[in-house]
Image (cartoon, rainbow, N blue to C red):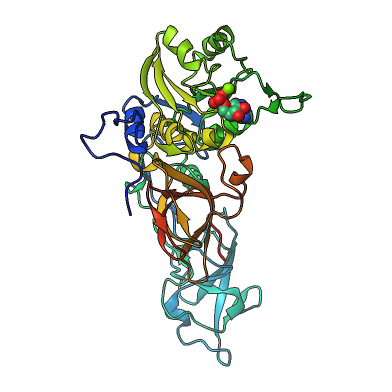
């Protein structure tokens, strides 16, 4: 598939029409992002964090041979010929529950009653399942032998060997990794520091969620939605009060955001009479990196460094702000956290489109899509669930991906299309 995430070397100049391509903009942003370093957190808080150092097994696990079944620990040679009609009768030496150390070695003609997870006693090499025995207390009838010695015994080191590489630095910790870290005695782990992201909305028309909405006003949906996508991207949002459309209000809000690792604002970066954000940033001494990206939704993206802090001026339209965030801010957060490059962007794949689509514009389209697996297990995509306007928040409902269409690209139902994956993909 076409690489949608990066840009060929030597194509980084601003295009003649003044717009950056998505790849150029992404490269220009990412080359200015530095990893933030690491911190030590309790293992119980480490899920979804990025492991900073390679994990090597400090010892064998299981530490000792132990039983995989409830049953009897025996010598395989003793029981090889056992049948229900002619059982092998063994003397029972002791009970070995999980957590107890066996006291007696199993000799010829002997067995010990053993539970799942308990240490296999010296002398025994096999565990016979309780279902294949008749227990008489001091003795046991073995009704069925196991085929081979070693059956139902979990051997020392078969889960992990001391010195074995287990988890590579840069891995996001999920429940399985947390379990492995616990197994190797790590009550604390060193992970990439989670960035803080200031979120600032601006606009005279905005009222907060739950406040009364007057004529001409709309609810500020960007602050909560951006707060959510910040969290989902592995960072901590810092929600700032909404700024009015005035230079002084915007300046005060931006000053309040300093100290965070990133600043993300929405609105006020377009070409309207009340779009003051860029002007304020320039007055504050920001070093402008880019403005305007050839994408739809999301053209009026502004990116600068404000006293070294990466500042993203996202468009105000709700869908534009979320799509721009996912294309540029999320990769920046991931890079700053310390993830390897392959994990910066949303996962990409190819899907079969379910209907005709055409991009007759000049900007790369990111269409909100529902992805699913069809009966044959192939990824399919549809963008027909809702209208696709950049002000239409409902186009994001149920959207677990984007269909990416380049300018002039037309596809018909059944064609392959490039997609980015946002969430879980279910079957038919
Ligand atoms: P702007 O970029 O400020 O010109 O805003 C573009 C569009 O997005 C306008 O229709 C705004 O009303 C809308 N908008 C801006 N900020 C927000 C916000 N925080 N929540 C919802 N809509 C917004
Ligand atoms: Mg505005």
> Toward which corner of the image does residue 245 lie, by quadrant?
top right
How many labels, in total?
A: 0
Q: Report the quarter where the N terminus lies.
A: bottom left
Q: Position of residue 327 (x, y in %)?
A: 44, 37
Q: Position of residue 348 (x, y in %)?
A: 40, 50
* 311 in relation to 180, above or below: above
Looking at the image, the residue that sits furthest to the right is: 212
In which quadrant of the rendered image does the C terminus lie?
Answer: bottom right
Which residue is located at x 57 percent, y 42 percent?
389
Q: Position of residue 251 (x, y in %)?
A: 53, 9
Residue 369 in view, yes or no: yes
- Whether residue 22 sits left or right of residue 396 in the image: it is left
Q: Residue furthest left?
A: 10
Which residue is rendered at x = 49% and y = 24% of the image?
270
Residue 18, image x, y percentages:
34, 28
Residue 186 in view here: no
For the residue pair 207 and 422, the one nearer the viewer reads as 207
Quadrant of the picture in which ligand 1 is shown: top right
């Amino acid at each position: 598939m076409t690489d949608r995430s990066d840009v060929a070397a030597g194509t980084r100049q601003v295009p003649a029409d003044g717009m950056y391509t998505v790849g150029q903009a992404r490269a220009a942003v990412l080359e200015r992002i530095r990893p933030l370093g690491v911190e030590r957190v309790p293992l119980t808080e480490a899920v979804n964090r990025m492991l900073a150092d390679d994990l090597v097994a400090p010892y064998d696990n299981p530490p000792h041979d132990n039983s995989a079944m409830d049953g009897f620990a025996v010598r395989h040679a003793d029981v090889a010929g056992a049948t229900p009609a002619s059982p092998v009768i063994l003397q029972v030496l002791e009970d070995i529950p999980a957590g107890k150390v066996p006291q007696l070695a199993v000799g010829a003609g002997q067995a010990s009653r053993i539970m799942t997870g308990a240490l296999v006693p010296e002398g025994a090499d096999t565990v016979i399942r309780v279902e294949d025995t008749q227990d008489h207390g001091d003795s046991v009838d073995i009704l069925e032998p196991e085929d081979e010695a070693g059956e139902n015994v979990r051997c020392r080191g078969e889960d992990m060997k001391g010195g074995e590489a287990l988890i590579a630095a840069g891995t996001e910790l999920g429940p399985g990794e947390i379990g492995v870290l616990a197994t190797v005695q790590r009550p604390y782990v060193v992970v990439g520091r989670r960035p803080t992201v200031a979120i600032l909305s601006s606009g005279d028309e905005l009222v907060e969620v739950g406040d009364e909405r007057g004529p001409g006003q709309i609810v500020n949906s960007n602050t909560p939605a951006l707060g959510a996508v910040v969290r989902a991207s592995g960072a901590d949002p810092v929600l700032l009060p909404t700024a009015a459309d005035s230079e002084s209000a915007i300046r005060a809000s931006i000053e309040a955001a300093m100290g965070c690792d990133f600043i993300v604002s929405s609105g006020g970066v377009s070409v309207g009479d009340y779009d003051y954000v860029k002007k304020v940033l320039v007055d504050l001494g920001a070093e402008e990196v880019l403005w305007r990206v050839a994408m739809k939704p999301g053209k009026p993206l502004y990116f600068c460094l404000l006293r070294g802090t990466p500042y993203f001026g996202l468009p105000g339209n709700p869908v534009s702000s979320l799509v721009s965030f996912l294309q540029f801010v999320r990769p920046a957060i991931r890079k700053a956290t310390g993830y390897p490059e392959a994990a910066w962007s949303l996962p990409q794949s190819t899907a079969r489109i379910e209907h005709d689509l055409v991009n007759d514009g000049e900007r790369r389209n990111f269409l909100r899509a529902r992805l699913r697996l069809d009966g044959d297990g192939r990824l399919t995509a549809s963008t027909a669930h809702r209208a696709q306007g950049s002000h239409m928040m409902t186009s994001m409902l149920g959207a677990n991906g984007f269909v990416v269409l380049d300018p002039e690209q037309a596809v018909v139902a059944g064609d392959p299309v490039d997609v980015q994956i946002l969430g879980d993909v279910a079957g038919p």
